[in-house]
Amino acid sequence: MASVQDNLLDWLKDAHAMERQAEDMLTAQAKRLEHYPDLKQRIEQHIEETRWQQGQVDAAIKRLGGSPSVLKDIGGKAMAFGQAMAGMTMPDEVIKGSMSGYVFENLEIATYTVLITAARAAGDEETAMACEAILKQEEAMAQWILEHLGPTTQQFLGRSQNPDLEAKR
Ligand code: MG
Ligand code: FE
């Protein structure tokens, strides 16, 4: 048996780990990008948003009397490291990175949709409103990535055909 508050707290801890993973993944991506300045800049903006989100989730966890799960956070960091390493070996890392980014943002959208409902069910309006603000940022990032996937692909294909240019990052 678990109360609504127990579930809410557990899901907030998952979200905290997810945002740690997001920060590491985005940081690794931004650091490597060279020839896609718009993408790099948008990712850097989202790193700032992600750090703010971590603070919001952390505060919600503390309001419920919990603390972020070290184990879950470490799991997220390990996953981010694995993804960053895998990305670096790909000859089309900017494309695979954009695709993974889009998938990840949609995972975040799903996560905060669940959290908003759980927070309202627990009568925790402050957390519901914080998650709504975060959800807007995730939706904006997902939309940006999707809108830029075509242009990024065109740029990648163009650079790939020129032996003097690096295309992958
Ligand atoms: Mg996020
Ligand atoms: Fe995000």
Image (tube, rainbow, N blue to C red):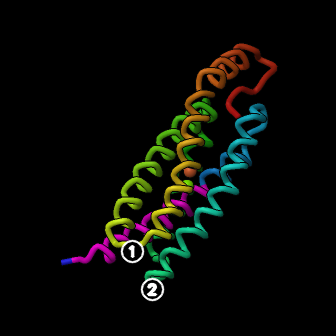
Residue found 55% across the figure and 48% down from its top: 136
Residue found 53% across the figure and 43% down from its top: 139
The relative height of residue 113 versus residue 7 in the rendered view (above or below) is above
The kind of secondary structure element at disc 2 is loop
The kind of secondary structure element at disc 1 is helix
Q: Is residue 154 visible?
A: yes
Q: What's the amino acid at mark 2? A: Gly
Mark 1 Cβ and ligand 1 under 8 Å apart: no
> Which of the numbered marks, if any, corresponds to residue 42?
none
Residue 164 is situated, as x and y percent measured from the top left of the image, at 81, 19
Dot 2 or dot 1: first in sequence order is: 1
Q: What's the amino acid at mark 1? A: Leu
Say few, some or many: other residues with alpha carbon within 10 Å of mark 1 (under 14 / 14 to 19 / 20 or more): many
Say few, some or many: other residues with alpha carbon within 10 Å of mark 2 (under 14 / 14 to 19 / 20 or more): few
Q: Give the magenta part as a residue range.
A: 2-24
* Residue 43 figure quarter: top right
User: Along the horizontal axis of the image, is 153 left or right of 42?
Assistant: left
Q: Is residue 14 magenta?
A: yes
Cβ atoms under marks 2 and 1 closer than 8 Å: yes
Q: List the single residue furthest toward the right.
A: 164
Of residues 50 and 23, the one nearer the viewer is: 50
- The residue labelled by disc 2 is 65
| Mark 2 → mark 1, Cα distance in angstroms | 9 Å
Q: Main secondary structure of the magenta part?
A: helix
Q: Is residue 96 magenta?
A: no
